[in-house]
Amino acid sequence: MKRNNLYTLAALLVVLSMILAACGGKAATTQAPAEEPVATQPASGGEQPPAGEPKVTLAIEHFSVIAGTTWSGAHDRAGKRLAETYDNVEYIYRESVAPDQSVPFAEEMIAQGANIVVGNAEFMGMPLKDIAAKYPDVYFVSIIASDLSTEPNFIRYFPRQYQALYLEGLIAGALTQTGNIGIVSAFPNVQVLRRTAGFVLGVQDAAKLLNKEVNVYVKYAGDWYLPQEERDIATTLVDQYNVDVLTQQTDSGSALDVAQEKGIWFVGKDMDIVGEYGWSSTDTVAVSFDTRWEVGYNLILQEFMKGNKTPPTILYPGMETTMTLKDGTVIPTVDLMNDGKVGVDAISPKALPLIPQSIIDLVKQRREQMMKGEWDPFTDHELVSNGTGLELSGLPIPPEGTVVKPAGQEATIEFLLSQFNFDLLGTIILK
C-alpha cells in the first residue's frame, strides 16, 4: 500500500508539472524560420508556441458594421481565425469607425494591450500614420485604395483579388447566353478599376475561346453601400440591357436580390456568400471569390513575433501565398469559393453543365498556375485603355486605344496599386 501511495504521489507530481508547463505556454507564439521569405512562404498554423513569447493583441478597426457585410465580415473572420490558430494571439475590434475616430479608438485599444492596429479601409486607416512614431513598438496597418504612404511601423496591405476575379470572368463569359454581363459598381477609383479589369480580362478570354461576342456594362451607384440605388441599377441592367449575369463592386445584397428575382446568374465578391452567410443559393450564385485577409495579417504577425522593427511595409500577396489554419486547412490569399467548396468545385452544380469543358479546364489550369506563382493575368495580357476611368493628380486617363502595359511585361506593384486609373478597352460605362 505504501509503495502504491508513493507511485500515486509521483504520478500526481508529473501531471501537475505538465499542467503548469502547459499554462506557461499560453503566452507564446509560433515563430516562422528566419530564412523563410515574407509574403511567399505559407505560415504554419495550429502549433503550440514556445514558452516565454509575449501575447499579441490584434486590433481591427472596421469602417462598417460587421454583420451582413462581406468586406468587414471577412476581416472579422480573419481576426478570429488568427486568434484560433495562435494560442498567444487575441483579437479585439471596433465597428463603424469613421476617420476622426481612428486615432482615439486605436489609442484606447493600445491602452488595452493592442500591439497591431489595423484600419480596414484606406480613408479611415490613414490617420493611424499620424501616431506611428508615437508608438514605435506597435505595428499600424492600413488597407490600400491608392495611397502608398508608409512609415517603418505603418504597413500597407491589399490582396491580389484580381486573380480570382479573372477566374470569375472566365465563368461569367461562358455562362451568358444574351452576351451581356452587368456590374453594379460603387465609383471609379484605382481599387475598383483594377478589380473590374481582372474580371473583364477573364470575360474577354472566355469570349475569344468560345468565339462569341460579350459586352460588359458598368454603372456606378456613387458609394459602396446604397441598397436602393444598387437595386435600381441592377434592374436597369437586366431590363434595359438584357443582362443575364450580374456581379457587383458594391457592398449591399441588392444586386443579388435582383438576380434571384429575375432568374439570372450572379457572381459574388469578397466572400463565399452562400456558404458563409446563407445568402441565396447555388441556383442563383454561379461562383464567388473569397478573400482570406488573415493570410496577409499572418505575414505581419510573423514579423512582429520575430521582433522585426523594420518589417516590409507594402504587402500585395496573391494566390501563391498561403497559411495553415488551426484545423490544418491550407488557404491561399484569394480563391474561388461557393457553398463551402473551392476551386473548380465551387462552380454551381446548376451552372456547371452550361459551361464548356474548355473553359472549366482553363479555370483549373490558370488557378493552379497562379497558386504556384507561374502565371498572372495582368502580366500575360496587354492592358489597353478604354479612354474612361479616373483622372489622378498628374496622371490623366490614357486615351482610348493606348497600350498602357504590353503583354508579357510584369506590372509594378506601384502601377497596380496606385496608378491603374483606366477601364480596359471594350468596357461599356453607362451614365
Image (tube, rainbow, N blue to C red):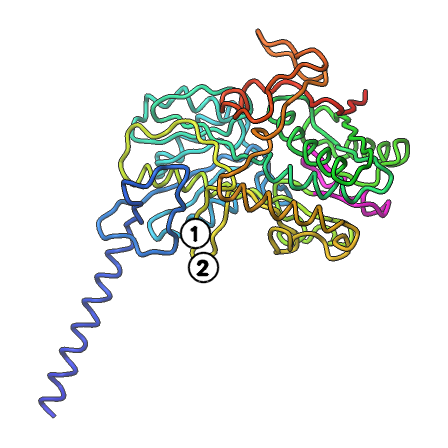
Q: Position of residue 263 (x, y in %)?
A: 85, 48
- Residue at left offset 44%, top offset 19%: 149
Q: Which SS class for mark 1?
A: strand
Q: Is residue 135 left or right of residue 386?
A: left
Report the residue that reaches farthest toward the left.
Answer: 2
Disc ID at residue 293: none
- Residue at left offset 75%, top offset 26%: 221
Residue 228 appears in view? yes
Q: Does 121 sit above or below residue 89?
A: above
Q: Which residue is mark 2?
A: 327
Q: Position of residue 187 (x, y in %)?
A: 69, 23
Specify the segment rendered in magenta: 247-267
In reply to whether residue 266 is colored magenta, the answer given is yes
Q: Is residue 252 left or right of residue 142?
A: right
- Residue at left offset 76%, top offset 39%: 173
Q: Is residue 265 left or right of residue 91?
A: right
Q: Position of residue 9 (x, y in %)?
A: 14, 79
Report the residue that reaches farthest toward the bottom.
Answer: 1
Disc ID at residue 324: 1
Q: Does 210 sit above or below residue 222?
A: below
